[in-house]
Image: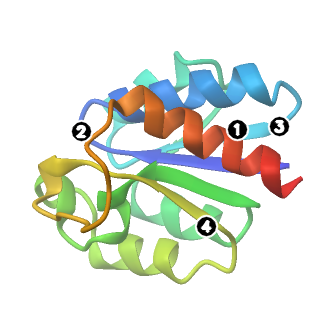
Amino acid sequence: MKIMIVDGQGGGVGRSLVEAMRERYPDAELIAVGTNAAATSNMMKGGTAVGATGENAVVYNSARVDYIVGPVGIIMANAMLGEITPRMAEAIASADVPVLLIPMSRCNARIMGVENRKLGDYIKEAVDKIAGDH
């Protein structure tokens, strides 16, 4: 199973996702894809040896994985202070795989009906969703 974790900025959410996925799915191939080198580096410190950076890495890998996981901004053009390009957002949103999104309030999107919970709760839910699919 291949899981792509996408994050930008400092990669903190992505790193937490990598750590949780690595613990739950030790045999999965985790691919850390950052919108910048700092995000990729931080995610890789979470326990994956595979990482890539930038728009082409997002586009290329979106079509080659079983799951895509990251903050909700990864499907919003110009989110994360402009780090998510329209091409990145389109590739992720158009991927023919489950895209598991972590709600974040920093991208100016409010998803109605989503409870205000701790980040760790949403990460656990994303990790558990994959287990439920397999």
> Relative to residue 5, is residue 25 depicted above or below?
above
In space, the residues marked 2 and 4 are separated at their CA atoms by 19 Å
Label annotation for residue 9: 2
Q: Do the residues bearing badges 1 and 3 touch, measured as CB atoms within 8 Å?
A: yes
Specify whether 45 is left or right of 98: left
In space, the residues marked 3 and 4 are separated at their CA atoms by 16 Å
Callout 4: SS:
helix
Q: Amino acid at mark 2?
A: Gln
Q: Which quarter of the figure has residue 66?
A: bottom right
Image position, residue 99 (x, y; %): 57, 64
Q: Amino acid at mark 1?
A: Leu
| Residue picked out by circle 1 | 30
Please tell me which of labels 3 and 2 falls first in the chain.
2
User: Tell me, what colour scheme is on the image?
Assistant: rainbow
**Image point (60%, 78%), residue name:** 95
Label annotation for residue 28: 3
In space, the residues marked 4 and 1 are separated at their CA atoms by 13 Å
Task: Answer few, some or many: residues within 10 Å of disc 2's Cα (few below 14, many 20 plus, some between 14 and 19).
Answer: some
Specify whether 33 is left or right of 64: left
| Residue picked out by circle 4 | 62
Specify whether 26 is left or right of 117: right
